[in-house]
Amino acid sequence: MRKSILLLSLVVVALSMNSCFNNLESHTTPQIMFGHVYVNPQFSNDTLISAKDTLLDKYNYELGLSYLDTMQLGDTVMFNSLFSSDMNNLVNITASFDTVNVQLWFGLDVNDEKIKNALASGSRPEKGVLNFNPMYNMVTFPIYIVPQKTGVHAIKITVTSDSKYPTNSAPFMLPVK
């Protein structure tokens, strides 16, 4: 009798422990981080050696978005970005913007072998679209923006992962005079 109770107890413990292991996958919202926003950056090879200015941003809590300082028409804005998805895979990164009034591109060297391996078909860095092959969970690159007209331009950068919480976006407004 003791052996059967002990055996039954072990079976119950084993089954209950097994149920704990069913949901071990990590599911987190992908992260977006941006660096300083440089105006008309100058490079020597891959090193930033100067910039005309840096733009600050102000967050509007009522609207839930950031406003960059005003820039001049004809200036180029560049900022470094980091996208990560912790234990999940990145699926894509896209930029939504008015293609008539704003030129935006992701500064990736598509001839680099590591970049070629990471990017899936349909990627268009020069248009703000990156699709990823499986097994990539972090990428960093500069984003360039050149406004084509004066006004306030809405830009939204979105990262998507294969998590249960798959998307995160960074909307911001770019005033140009």
Image (cartoon, helix red, strand yellow):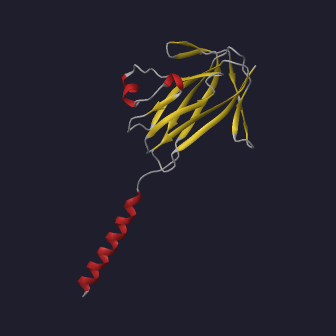
Foreground residue among 99 and 169 = 99
Q: Residue at x 34, y 65 (%)?
A: 18
Rendering coords of residue 134 (x, y %):
38, 38
Is residue 117 shown above or below 46?
A: below
Q: Residue at x 40, y 30 (%)?
A: 121
Q: Is residue 5 left or right of 174 when viewed as pictured?
A: left
Q: Quadrant of the C terminus?
A: top right
Please identify the quarter of the rendering in which residue 78 is found.
top right
Q: How many marks?
A: 0
Q: Position of residue 67 (x, y in %)?
A: 71, 32
Q: Position of residue 25 (x, y in %)?
A: 41, 53
Determine the image quadrant of residue 11: bottom left
- Furthest residue to the bottom? 1
Which part of the image, by quadrant, shows the N terminus? bottom left
Please tell me in which quadrant of the rendered image residue 51 appears. top right
Instruction: Name the spot of residue 136 as percent of width and height, x first.
Output: 41, 36
Report the residue at 48% width, 36% height from top.
92
Q: Which residue corresponds to the image point at 55% horizontal and 13% vertical from the top-left?
A: 43
**Residue with the most extreme front position:** 100
